[in-house]
Each structure stands twice: as C-alpha cells, then as structure tokens.
Amino acid sequence: MYAVGVLVRGPHSVLAGAADCWQTNPTHMSNAPKRKRALITGITGQDGSYLAELLLEKGYQVWGMIRRASLFNTHRIDHIYQTPQEENVRLQLRYGDLSDAGSINAVVQESQPDEIYNLGAQSHVKVSFDVPEYTADVTGLGTLRILDSVRSLGFNSRIYQASSSELFGQAVESPQTEATPFNPRSPYAAAKAFAFHIARNYRESYGMYAVNGILFNHESPRRGPTFVTRKITRAVAAIAAGRQEKLFLGNLDARRDWGFAGDYVRAMWLMLQADEPEDFVIATGTTSSVRDFCSLAFARAGLRIHWSGEGKEERGVSADGRTLVAVDPRYFRPAEVANLVGDASKAKQKLGWEPTVDLQGVVNMMVDADRQLLDEEHGDAAVE
Ligand code: NAP
Ligand code: F7E
C-alpha cells in the first residue's frame, strides 16, 4: 500500500475549527486528547472532496480510500494534497475498492476510524443500466462489506451511508419524507435500496451506529461532467465562448430538487454527531425541470432562450434564432424518475440543518466556474 499526506492550506488551516473534533482517549498512553479519525470512501468524488475539506477544517485526521486508475483521479482533492513526507500529515490515502472486501478490511483496520462516510459508488443512474451487475456489487454490496468489516473487527465506528432520493423513484407522494415508500426505477436505485436496508439492518441487529442520509440531487462546480447540471453549465460556457454550437439533452421534463453539495456534506457530518442513529432526508424543498435549469444557466451567460416544439422536436432557441438546445433520445433512460422533491423538516428540527444556497445560487456558481475554467484553459471544452 502507498500512503500520501496533506498540508492543509489557506481556508483549510489546521487551526480552523479544530475544537470540533477533539475527544478524550482512555486507551491512549498520554492524557492528551486525540483527534477524531474519519475514513471516507469516494473521497475523489464531488461529495468526498467537500467532506474531506470540512473534516480537515474541523481538525479531523482523515483517511481516504481511492481506487487505482491509469491516470491521476485525485484532481478534486489536489488542493489539499501533499506528500507523506510532510510533518503533521492530516490526510492519508490508501488504495482500495468497494468490490474488494480484503482491501476494505485493511483500510478500516489501519485507520481505526471513529466515523466512516461511505460515499463511494457507481453513482450514475443511466450508466447503471449499462453495468447493472457492477453497480449492484459496488453500490449495493460495497456497503455491506463496509458494515461487516466494522462489525467483524469489533469497532465502534459510526457509519454514514450515502442513500439517495432515487430510492423514491416513481414517488407515491410529494414531497418525499423519511416515511415515503421506496419505488426504485434503476439498477442504481435498486442497489441503493439494498444498501439502505442493510445499513438499517446492521443498526437494528448489532446496535451499530449506521445511518442513511437520503440526499436529493446536489450539485457544484465539482459535479461530474455527465450529470445533467454540469453537462449544461459546461455547454453554456462553451456556447457563450463560441466554442460549441449546441447542446443535446434527453428528457427536458424531468424535475429534480437541486441543492449545493457543500451544504449537503455538512448534513452528513451532523448525522454522525447526533445522540441516536437515525435516517434523514436532505433536500431544499423546491423542484425544477431540466428545461428550467437550462434557461437559468443560459441566462446567467447572457443568452436568453425560448422553447419551441414538443417531445423529441423541442428546441431551445436563442434571441437571434439559433438552436442552442436539442433533444437526443439517446439520453433517455429505460425507466425515468419524473419528479422528486424532498421535505427536510426532520433534519431542520433534529440537526438544525438548512440549505444556504438555492437553485439560482447553484446555477450561478456552476456557470461562472465553468466560464472561468474555459478562460483559463483556452482549450476545447468538449461536452459529452
Ligand atoms: P461521484 O462524484 O460519482 O463520486 C463517486 C466516488 O466513488 C468517486 O470517488 C469514485 O472514484 C468512487 N468509486 C466508484 N467506484 C468505486 C469502487 N469500485 N471502489 C471505491 N470507490 C469507488 O458521486 P458524488 O456525487 O460525490 O456522490 C457521493 C455518494 O452519494 C455516492 O454514493 C452517490 O451515489 C450518493 N448520492 C449522490 C447524490 C448527488 O446528487 N450527488 C445524491 C444522493 C446520493 P473515482 O473518482 O475513481 O471514480
Ligand atoms: O439526471 C435528465 C435525466 O444524471 C437528472 C446522481 O447523483 O442524483 C443523481 O442522479 C435528470 C434525469 O442525475 C440528460 O433523465 C435529461 O431525469 O443529472 P442526472 P440523477 O439521475 O437524478 C441522484 C439523487 C443520485 O443519487 C445519483 O447518484 O436529468 N436528463 N437530459 C439528463 N441526464 C443526464 N445525465 N444527461 C442528459 O443529457
């Protein structure tokens, strides 16, 4: 195994918020309090990177499990990365894979975490139709491997499971709460349903502190480029710069409750600080269509679009008559989730959690970041 470390810089100073994470350690030789230790799977992903920043700010010792790739896949955490030769290393990375129980056991054993955030997953809904068995293995069974590793090692680690609003699928009520029945519509959602229930089962069977955060869609400039919001904001940046002609999308009618990822990782942390292990819905409470998101994103770049036509013939057209958005059925899904909107009242009441960024704020942040990125790159912003 290889180890890398981190020197926390700027706003992520080791001094910032450190008081949040000290704990006494009765087994420790000295009387000095020790730092809390957190293990994050999926640390190289959107949420993992924001969560790592948050925990470092709070003074944690952070361990991240990363998987081997043929190219560097740590760009989202490069700004908090430093070599293991530095002093006071606070972030350590270990190779591992959610499909490999041995590697999970090794990193859990070595890090002895107070808290585990299981964010690793094959997280793309449409791709899960292409690789259903792999998705079930990593996104579903991977969660069981984490839980059983902690159980068999006899650790008291608190475990956060990244559950998803996709569990509600073709939702039977609106808005969705912790009590809304699940109705998964994809291999991804089915895998997350297994993960949800096995986390709850380990909590009930073995008294483990394992909780599900049922998070609705959350976005940021670090969102993967094939999720619809980022696909749109990258295309808007490229079109506004004259580097791309049009954007092809799938179902423009789909409605989602979009929040900001930075707000949502704060909720994950709060869930593991509660007195009792409980599951929570995390959402903004407003829903908008893909079409709405598009209109807002183009407007942010100074391009007003109007919509004409219906179904596969629908177009987003600029004031000067150019088609900037067209529908390509290749992006339709075998089964679609039409409309999601969450009610996060329980999180507000019990955790004091509320979102700080609304949809317009998310759109502005993402469009501005992608335009700046394009300016800096002076390169080609090829959009999938
Ligand atoms: P993401 O950007 O796709 O990140 C997924 C992470 O999982 C990446 O670090 C990825 O590594 C890692 N991973 C993938 N396969 C793995 C494997 N076999 N073994 C170990 N790690 C693996 O996802 P995200 O948006 O940050 O979401 C975080 C979690 O929350 C996921 O579980 C997702 O399903 C769930 N969730 C997300 C949302 C949302 O709106 N973002 C909402 C609800 C739930 P690479 O970097 O190497 O690919
Ligand atoms: O799709 C529609 C698409 O891929 C949103 C993941 O983080 O959130 C995410 O899953 C909607 C869908 O996210 C395109 O059909 C239209 O209705 O951005 P998405 P998702 O499927 O909601 C949940 C909560 C998770 O847990 C997941 O991990 O947008 N849509 N046209 C499109 N979607 C994509 N990707 N690309 C299109 O061209």
Image (cartoon, rainbow, N blue to C red):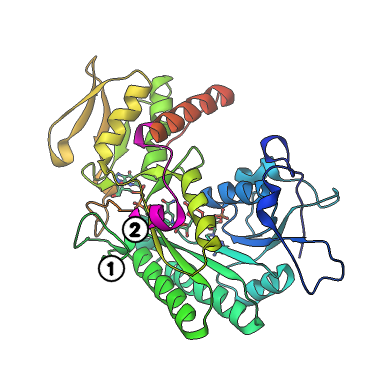
Dot 1 surroundings within 10 Å: few (below 14), some, or many (20 or more)?
A: some
Q: Name the residue carrying label 2.
A: 165
In the displayed structure, 5 sits above or below 246; it is below
Q: Is residue 248 magenta?
A: no
- Horizontal side of 305 relative to 347 (left or right) equals left
User: Which disc, if any, is residue 232?
Assistant: none
Residue visible at 27% across and 64% down in the picture: 185
- Is 1 displayed left or right of 383 in the figure? right
Residue lying at 73% horizontally and 38% vertically, measured from the top left: 9
Front residue of 355 and 362 = 355
Give percent across and percent down for residue 377: 57, 26
Please say if 46 is above or below 206.
above
Tell me if I can see residue 330 in this picture. Answer: yes
Residue reaching furthest top? Answer: 320
Is label 2 within 8 A of ligand 2 (CB to nearest ligand atom)?
A: yes
Instruction: Identify which amino acid the numbered label 1 is placed on.
Output: Phe
The front one of 307 and 338 is 338
Label placed on residue 182: 1
How far apart are the two marked residues, 2 and 1, measured between alpha carbons?
A: 9 Å
**Percent x, y of residue 86:** 85, 48
- Residue 177 percent across, percent down from the top left: 29, 60
Kindly identify the residue that appears in the image at 42 percent across and 39 percent down: 230
From where the camera sits, is residue 226 visible?
no
Q: Assess whether residue 358 is covered by the magenta stretch.
A: yes
Write the start and end of the magenta stretch as one range: 344-360
**In this rendering, is residue 138 above or below 166?**
below
Q: Is mark 2 on a helix, strand or loop?
A: helix
| 198 vs 14, nearest the viewer | 14
Q: Quadrant of the N terminus?
A: bottom right
Q: Is 340 positioned to the left or the right of 42 in the image?
A: left
Amino acid beneath label 2: Ser
